[in-house]
Amino acid sequence: MKQLISLSVQRPKAIIAAWLLLLVVSAPFALKLEGALKAGGFSNPRGESVHAQHTLEQAFHEAPNSLLIVLHDRAGSVRSAVDEARQAARRPGVTTITDERAHPEWVSKDGRTTFLQVGFSGDNTTVQNVVPTLRDDVRAAVSKDVEVDVTGAPALDYALNVHSKEDVTRAEMIAFPVLFIVLLLVFRSLVAMAVPLVMAGVTLALTQAIGYGMAQVTDVNSLFTNIVSMVGLAVAVDYSLFIVKRFREELADGQDVPTAVGRSMRTVGHSVLFSGLAVVVAMSALFVPRAMSFTSIALGGVAVAVVAVTMAMTLLPAVLRLLGHRINAGTLRRRKKATAASVVPKAEAGRVSKHPLLILAVLVAGFVALAWPATQLTLRVPVASADILPAGDSARVGIARIKQDIGVREMFPVEVVLTAHAKDSSALLTSATDIADYAKNAKGADSVQGVSTLGLPAGSLPQALADGTGLDTAGKAAVGQLWTAVGDTLVTRVLVTPDADPDSAATHHLVSDLRSHLKSDTSPGVKAELAGATATGSDFDDLVVGSIPLVVLVVALLSFLILFLAFRSTVLPLLALAFNVLVVGASLGFLALVAGGADHSINSVTPLMLFAVMFGLSMDYMVIMIGRMREMYLDGASHRDAVLGGLARTAGLVNGAAAIMVAVFVSFTSAQISIVRELGISLATAVVLDAVVIRRLLMPATLLLLGDRIWGGNRRSAPQEAGSVVAAASVSAPAGTELPPTGPDLSAPTPR
């Protein structure tokens, strides 16, 4: 890395030209990213329900993907529009079209609403691309009085991708003007303000191009673009802020431009490198669940952090080398200069130093109290609900229309899939009968359908299933949907219609109940699994909950190693983990209060993503502040003076960086997609708590209580007189003057 930085300083034009060439080459691929993103990702690919669904598709020749065309006639009966819609829906890839003639229950009681189920042979992404044209074709074919909406899993995924792109665009349009203002207030120079924004734009563009390449070799969903914008804007701007600020200070101290760039990169650049590494480590932990949603987040977070750090280590020093003193061009009329005393008032430092134990106890109690509502949260990924989408979206309107006028419970049954070798047909039938009998009385079940519920005499049922003896045409059709053979394997299913919506707690409890029964009461030689939307969601939720300990452990161990290498301390990494747990818990508690809903449920993805992102980003503050405190201590300050003086020196910088992150995350609270909105709320809350409460109060109070054993290393000189460093940082500078830097670095330990 030192060689790269040296090259950037020595040949800045060549480095900038290389980055511009890379940007030009990458631009076409970045523009193709949206079309390369896959759908879904909120299922456990190794889960029982996914395997059971594949068994059903193979055994009963069911279309792997289907869309629902919802028709609602405002003027009268909708039946007259069914044939027109059916004809308009025919196209390559369609394998089946089922309507109310096969399922009379698919028509509302007033006769104004119905739907057609269109089965496709293609994969989910292929079917997604059909959604807009299918909707337009059917609308053109039916009467103007008929409202047409297309819904179903591929349509919901299509809408999710579309609105995710809109959310990112909207958030960036909000964030960039806010960042413009924040950076202008921090730098009070138009050129200095523009540099971090340009770096952020380059970072986002290149990462999107990298995302397109990743999508060619693995499945990536729309969460990739959201996390790239969220994390990318935050880290790219913050890293540039740290380095540009130090560069301007070096110039103000009389250093020539090459020396100022070199010193800035050796000090603050050192901190940025460790901070970026912490983000990469934290985001990499999200590979643990091995589900597309988490993998997409991990890929986006890792890629954008690597690009941001590489840019900060190469492109940014080259730009600063060329700009030189022009970095201060466009300077606005300066207001009265704030001293370190105004950043961390002497009275505040006094309270922290005089009553650290009281402050520690009160703040920890406050964090625990704020986190308490999080204990009531239920982690549940929406699997058969369109509530994640904006209210006016066609896919959400369609599913809401079915739910209101017809009912969705019959559309999303819990399916018990049983398989056995042909020689074990009697055991298979016995198991199917026992399960159907149990399900009839299970709490949360409304109706049950299986081969044993068709009304055939028990004695003649085995023969009827074997060769159709005693069955009429309708009976054979019914049996064909419930019992079949695939080679020498028999497959049957029991359909359990819940008495509540598929995303409800009651239906999730029904799934758990049936699974417990299957484990204990299935006959030998018979394999039983659950399929259906609720079972798929339950498997994903279990995957998330089961992954939490390992994700936390991976982040904790790797971050411990990084901070140990940075500070040569075992206590500081443990403090970082403890502080982050407090912040994440309190943020989830706040989220439960404002967005948990009546059933206190949030998306399963949110907690793990919050933990990983916040842990990575909070390392910025940890490295900057602790690094400055440690250096002051090693330079001879007393432990108390090092803690309070380092706090005074870095609090303003951290506040500016936090304001940038809050601006970015708040911009995502306008998102139409609920999971993105949840993340925006929780991350903005976490940053405020971390920067304002943890770093300015809780961390210094804890450090004062622990004493100087946390620092390690050899001091350069005897401790200064108590209070001298704090006094120098907060009292001696006259109002309206710049504070000269104490020691060689304002943010990180100088490599020795």
Image (cartoon, helix red, strand yellow):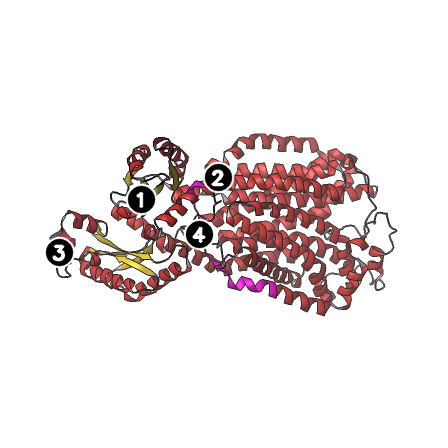
Viewer-nearest of labels 4 and 1? 1
Q: Quadrant of residue 459?
A: bottom left
Q: Which residues are magenta?
A: 368-396
- Asked if the residues shown at circle 4 and circle 3 are in contact, with their CB atoms under 8 angstroms apart, the answer is no
Classify mark 3: helix, strand or loop.
Answer: helix
Distance of mark 4 from mark 3, alpha carbons? Answer: 42 Å
Q: Which residue is identified by label 2?
A: 162
Inspect the image, locate mark 2, and give the three-letter code of the amino acid beneath it. Answer: Val
Tell which tag, 2 or 3, sits nearer the viewer.
Answer: 2
User: As rendered, which of 239 and 127 lies closer to the eye?
Assistant: 127
Q: Which residue is mark 3?
A: 463
For the question of whether residue 487 can be seen, the reply is no
- The disc at residue 382 is 4
What residue type is disc 4 on? Pro
- Name which residue lies at 37% across and 52% down: 533
Query: Label 2's element?
Result: helix
The reply to whether residue 391 is in sight is yes
Kindly identify the amino acid type of the residue bearing the numbered disc 3. Answer: Gln
Locate residue 376, reporting x and y percent: 51, 63
Choose the circle earlier in sequence order: 1 or 3. 1
